[in-house]
Image (tube, rainbow, N blue to C red):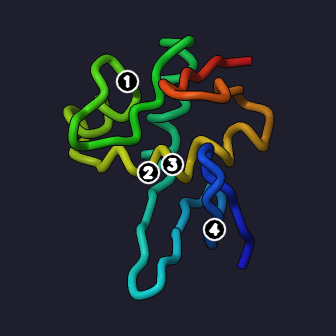
Amino acid sequence: MPLGTTITGVQFEYSGSLTTGLIIVFNSSALKITPEIVMIIRHEITTRSPVLMGANRKPLVADSVGETLWMKYKTSPQVMSYVLPLLVEEGFCTVSDRKPFVIHKW
């Protein structure tokens, strides 16, 4: 299984891709991220850059991609922790190196 690294440096295992959807593997569970959610994240970054990442649910980060995911799509902002580093790796965007994490579209 491929390994990814979150923006904060935590490694994670996953299967799939940004195009087909991701399954993030934890010790006793998994998180499924659909291709539709990845497309929504891409759209939010493209149309709102620079934009806050906002991977927290408590508290939600105001005016962030994570807040949009939770408020409009009932998807945990946590998915940003796994999708964003893969988007950075493919060259889609960059992210600041300290909190609050700000995403910039290339």
Residue at image location 55% in from the left, 12% down from the top: 50
Residue 19, compared with residue 32, is above or below; it is above
Does dot 3 land on a helix, a strand or a loop? helix
Asked if the residue under mark 1 is in contact with the one under mark 3, i.e. CB atoms within 8 Å, the reply is no
Amino acid on which disc 4 is placed:
Gly
Q: Amino acid at mark 3?
A: Ser
Task: Point out the residue furthest to the front here.
Answer: 98
Q: CA distance from mark 3 to mark 1?
A: 13 Å
State the image coordinates of residue 53 (x, y, percent, origin top left).
47, 30
The front one of 4 and 33 is: 4
Q: In this figure, which residue is indicated by the disc labeled 2?
A: 79
- Gap between marks 4 and 1 measured at Cα: 25 Å
Q: Under tag 4, what secondary structure?
A: strand
Q: Which residue is mark 4?
A: 16
N-terminal label among 3 and 1: 1
Q: Which residue is mark 3?
A: 81
Mark 3 and mark 4: span between their CA atoms? 16 Å
Q: Tags 2 and 3 in contact by the CB under 8 Å rule?
A: yes
In the displayed structure, does residue 104 sit left or right of residue 77? Answer: right
Task: Name the residue at 45% across, 57% down.
Answer: 34
- In the rendered image, the vertical position of residue 73 relative to residue 47, given as above or below: below
Residue in the picture at 35% in, 44% down:
77
* Amino acid type of the residue tagged 2 in the rendering: Val
Residue 93 found in image quarter: top right
Q: Position of residue 9 (x, y in %)?
A: 65, 52
Marks 1 and 2 sit apart, C-alpha to C-alpha, by 13 Å
- Check disc 1 and report its element: helix, strand or loop: loop
Note whether 1 is above or below 28 in the view shown.
above
What residue type is disc 1 on?
Ser
Please identify the quadrant where the N terminus is shown: bottom right
- Per the rendering, the mark at residue 64 is 1
